[in-house]
Image (cartoon, grey):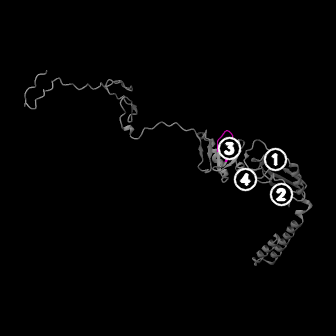
Amino acid sequence: MSAATIATRGAARGIRALPSLPPRFKRWLLIALAVCLVLAAGYRFWLRDSSLVTVEKVQVTGLTTKDAPRVRAALASAAHTMTTLHVRHEVLEQAIAAYPVVRALDVRPDFPHGLTIDVIEYRPAALVGGLPVAGDGTILRGIPVEGSLPKIDTRGAPHGNHLTEAAALHAARIAGTAPAALRPRLELIETRAQDGIVVQIRDGPELIFGDATRAHAKWIAATRVLADPEAEGASYIDVRLPGRPAAGGLPAATVAPVAPAGAAETAPPAGTTGVDPATEQLAPAVTNGDPATAEPNAPSTTQQPAPAPAPQSTQPAPAPTDSIGGGGAAPPAG
């Protein structure tokens, strides 16, 4: 249903809804409606496609690829078949369909004869088989590579205009969402059996992403951990749970030995010094000698003398009696 038909039916309903209007006012209203219909039809079928508003000047901006002259010529040729009142975006997109470097077109007509086309290109995010690819997996043949790009580990060279391997496609998404400050430091993006997607950073830890979901949140978590001084020296940062990132491989902290439970309640062994748990001061040395003469904080050298041998009896043993004589004295020896 055309716009003119809709407007006619709407006006008819409005006229029927106002039965109290005088006939003269209704007549002028119908005349105004007829004039509007004539103007709408003239615009629709004549003015918007007439030579009065045809495109004569085309300006194309935003191209950096080596195929820029061809893309510019294709867009200009398609634009010259249009008018500033009737710009057909689908025709412009079909004209540059052979150039995957173009991501989108921003078209702005300049009445009456001008048209400005701003080309939005894909930006290389990584290298796959030596070819630059965008974050969505589009292979960007012919785009100059500026600076260093991370390499994506794949099984073979890519074919066509888009990555088909799932692992390489997910890795490209991680590379495409990386912050601009970290992109020059990215070296390699690989997929491991246990960790999933892992990003290796130049002079930095490995970043374990797991998969390509929530890529923006994981990069934010990784950036915060990298900026934390306490994470300096970590060998990896696990951001598989971006709400709880973890830094691992830090140097082990030196921990003082802890005494066994109940050791503070027992007295230290003889000849050693201890710490009074109430005053946190060194207790005086415990010795086996006279504690009044012992020096504090010094081991004692006093030794307890060995016990003296038991005294032997000097009384002669009683003389044996004669078991037969019943108490007689023993005969003198010899």
Q: Amino acid at mark 2?
A: Glu
**Quadrant housing the N terminus:** bottom right
Q: Amino acid at mark 4?
A: Leu
Residue extending furthest toward the front? 334
Q: Amino acid at mark 1?
A: Ile
Q: CA distance from mark 2 to mark 1?
A: 19 Å
Density class for disc 4 (Cα within 10 Å; few <14, some 14-19, many ≥20) is many
In the displayed structure, 52 sits above or below 203; it is below
Density class for disc 3 (Cα within 10 Å; few <14, some 14-19, many ≥20) is some
Dots 4 and 1: beta carbons under 8 Å? no
Could you tell me residue 65's position as x and y percent? 83, 47
Q: CA distance from mark 3 to mark 4?
A: 17 Å
Residue receiving disc 1: 143
Residue receiving disc 3: 200
**Front-most of 80 and 290?**
290
Q: Is residue 84 left or right of residue 17?
A: right
Tag 4 or tag 3, which sits nearer the N-term? 4
- Residue at x-position 81% and y-position 78%: 23
Mark 1 or 3: in front is 3
Dots 2 and 3: beta carbons under 8 Å? no
Mark 2 or 3: in front is 3
Could you tell me residue 280's position as x and y percent? 40, 33
Residue 169 numbered tag? 4
Residue receiving disc 2: 93
Q: CA distance from mark 1 to mark 3?
A: 25 Å
Tag 2 or tag 4, which sits nearer the N-term? 2
**In the image, is residue 202 part of the stretch drawn in magenta?**
yes
**SS at mark 1?**
loop
